[in-house]
Image: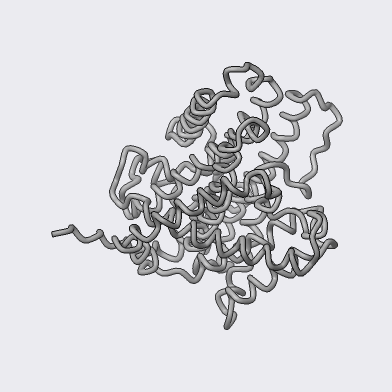
Amino acid sequence: MRTPLPPLAAPPSPAARAGDGGPAAGSVRRAAARGAAGAGRDPYFDNAKYLAIVLVAAAHSWEPFWDDSRAATALYLFVYTFHMPAFIMISGYFSRGFTFTPSRVRRLVAGVAVPYVVFQTAYALFRRWAHDEPDYPIDLFDPWFVMWFLLALFFWRLLTPVWERLRWPVTTSVVIAVLVSVSPSVGGELELQRVLRFLPFFVIGLTLRPEHFTLVRHRAARLLSLPVLLGALVFSYWAAPRMNHQWLFLRDPAQDLGVSAVTGAAMSLALLVCSLVLSACFLAWVPGRRLWCTALGAGTLYGFLLHGFLVKGSRWWGWYRPEWVHTPLGMVAVTLLASAAVTLLCTPAVRRALRAVVEPRMDWLFPRGPGRP
């Protein structure tokens, strides 16, 4: 007889929900620091966050192989279709119930806004030094590389009370995303194209319940996901030389990608559906039991923010120049190295060393005292 799936843990309390989400796992950071990753936490979500951050790092490591390998490009297209949507849906799920209470505003500022300012500045300084661009500006309104996600998460969380009170939140967010995808005037500063076009995944996360995750982990759903994943891989291989991968970044309007508004709107809807389906397939195969990597799920913010220095440095310092790197074995080695590096960046040792800048206490800005949380 097949052992039934363990039930998902009930969602955390409203205070805990306000600080957890995808890479920015704010409300659970202190529990992780105490080595209590299992107390009050569902290992399923920690496993999902860890596996997603590994896919993020692996996909970034494949970018230099675009011109060498159709298979590498296909894998890139395949993974990019769902790794961030899955991350963002989990972020939305753990953002449910966010309100403007002092404790939750404190978490939002300390866990999202402050790391954005710190690392946006750090990346600019790093680019000046590592890429020999002494005049590269420090611009908080133009997020660079991975920093768009923290900026987007900040705005999404601020609007959570609005989305939770709308009658048709998912439909509304999809309409906004599609309209933005064909609006050349939306973009530029603040990465508004990405913020608004990834918005439906966050709103969908807000509407999810524990039973939805239990449903996708059912044996029938897992078996059904196998041909879907295989078909997506085959399609990605076919599309590799034909499709502009810029579509997957959701940062350029349709007109900038050389298509009409009608085609762009259809493409945006198709990508959204594909991302949802593949995200469900990914979540179906996430282990629900505690594994060696489960505790690392509490440190995905660190891996997300820090791996970008290695990704960009590897290009600028010529790590991909040796010919052996551009072989199938070389790509496997690069993938393993990227996965190992981001794993190390999620460990408790790294979190302890950098907590002051990634998860500051902010007592100087939000003092505790009588009448304060």
User: Which sits in the foreground, 30 or 87?
Assistant: 87
Q: Looking at the picture, does residue 139 appear above or below residue 93?
A: above
| Residue nearer the viewer, 238 or 291 | 238
For the view shown, which residue lies furthest in the bottom direction? 167
Q: Position of residue 287 (x, y in %)?
A: 33, 49
Q: What colour scheme was applied to this rendering of the protein?
A: one colour
In the image, what residue occupies the spot 31% across and 51% down?
39
Taking the spot 40% from the left edge, 43% from the top edge, the residue there is 32
Q: Position of residue 272 (x, y in %)?
A: 60, 63
Q: Residue at position x 51%, y 55% from top?
A: 86
Expressed as whole percent of the image width and height from the top left, the position of residue 62 reads 59, 34
Q: Is residue 358 visible?
A: no
In this rendered view, identify the residue nearer to me: 231 or 160: 231
* Percent coordinates x, y for residue 225 in the rendering: 40, 58
Return the residue found at the far front: 238
Displayed quadrant of residue 101:
bottom right
Residue drawn at (61%, 40%) of the image:
73
Farthest residue, direction left: 1
Marker count (numbered): 0
The front one of 358 and 168 is 168
In the image, taking residue 131 as reference, residue 238 lies left or right, namely left
Q: Is residue 151 visible?
A: yes
Tell whether 183 sits left or right of 199: right
Q: Which quadrant: the N terminus?
A: bottom left
